[in-house]
Image (spheres, grey):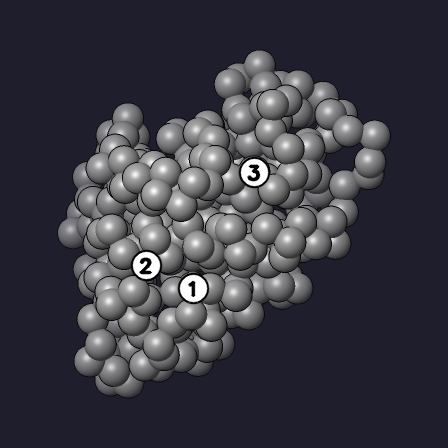
Amino acid sequence: MNEEERILMEEVKKVKELTSFTPEIGIVLGSGLGGLAEEVKKVLEIPYSSLPSLPTSSIPGHKGAFLFGTLREKKVILMEGRVHYYEGYSAKEVVRPERLMALLGAKKILLTNAAGGVNESFVPGDLMMIVDHIASLVPSPLRGENIDSFGPRFPDMSGVYSPSLQRKMKEAASSLSIPLKTGIYMQFTGPQFESPAEIRMAKTLGADAVGMSTAIEAIALSHMGVDVAGLSLITNKAAGLSKEPLSHEEVQEIASLSANKMEALVKKFVSLL
């Protein structure tokens, strides 16, 4: 057992000492989307800070806790806020909470985020289902010694975002008459917002939305054989596509205004699983 595996299994043991609850579905709540936690019939909440090896977030809008409970009669584990590579952690450390969710039993995990729209047809408030990603500018969470019990040394990334979960997401959106865009998400390191030249690059490479999370989480989970779904809330037009300067406050404001729509879609999606 290598060091990273040992660290994770120790955290699994600590959680299981606190609860016998076994989640089926995991959900990572992005910026401004924490309201979904209020819809969960709570069994237990565990702050990341009580699990010493887990990184803790310093970003407003990210609570920093695991929430165990039921949502639409399904056993779920929610990450109320995530940590980001730009906060100073390694990529391997950043994905520990998601890996822990999988080790606790969640074999289907939804990653949500707030993102900047690169596709010029997108407007703030749009929802985009992630069908693929570009993570070439961010260090891989798989760098270093492989954890063979999790997955292969050279995992295939041709189907990171589960086609079956994509169908369920489309079905959920259709049943609620919620317009759902589809697209490719590109992760940058942050914390600075992207420059107009970087957005032109992203557009040339085929990205529809950009952000500072998600892709490395999806890589780590795919490595473990988890079915991954991704959903972005477009909170702003990316740099160079609007005359307005970008700010974290704008991201939070748009996320708050559109949260009800996204939460309704996530609840319906969960009910279909």
Which quadrant is home to the N terminus? bottom left
Q: Earlier in the sequence, mark 2 or mark 1?
A: 2
Q: Can you say whether 78 is above or below 233 in the image?
A: below
Nearer to the camera, 170 or 232: 170
Q: Nearer the viewer, mark 2 or mark 3?
A: 3
Pointer 2: what residue?
26
Q: Secondary structure at mark 2?
A: strand
User: Which image quadrant is residue 68 in?
Assistant: bottom left
Splitting the image into 4 quarters, where does residue 20 fall? Answer: bottom left
Query: Mark 3 belongs to which amino acid?
Result: Asp
Side of 227 relative to 62 (left or right): left
Q: Would you say the residues marked 3 and 1 are in contact, meaning their CB atoms lie under 8 Å apart?
A: no
Marks 2 and 1: CB-CB under 8 Å? yes
Question: What is the distance, in whole Å, between disc 2 and disc 1 at their CAs?
Answer: 8 Å
Q: Which mark is residue 208?
A: none
Q: Amino acid at mark 1?
A: Met
Q: Residues within 10 Å of mark 2 (few under 14, many from 20)?
A: many
Q: Is residue 145 visible from the viewing direction of this image?
A: no
What is the x, y in percent for residue 114? Answer: 57, 46
Instruction: Give the quarter of the image for residue 51.
Output: bottom left
- Of helix, strand and loop, which one carries label 1? strand
> Which residue is label 3 attached to?
126
Where residue 16 appears, as percent x and y from the top left, is 23, 79
The nearer-to-camera label among 3 and 1 is 3
Q: CA distance from mark 3 to mark 1?
A: 23 Å
Mark 1 highlights which residue? Answer: 79
Q: Secondary structure at mark 3?
A: loop
Q: Residues within 10 Å of mark 1 (few under 14, many from 20)?
A: many
Q: Nearer the viewer, residue 260 or 20?
A: 260
Residue 112 appears left or right of 63:
left
Which residue does the image show at 28% across and 26% down from the upper left? 158
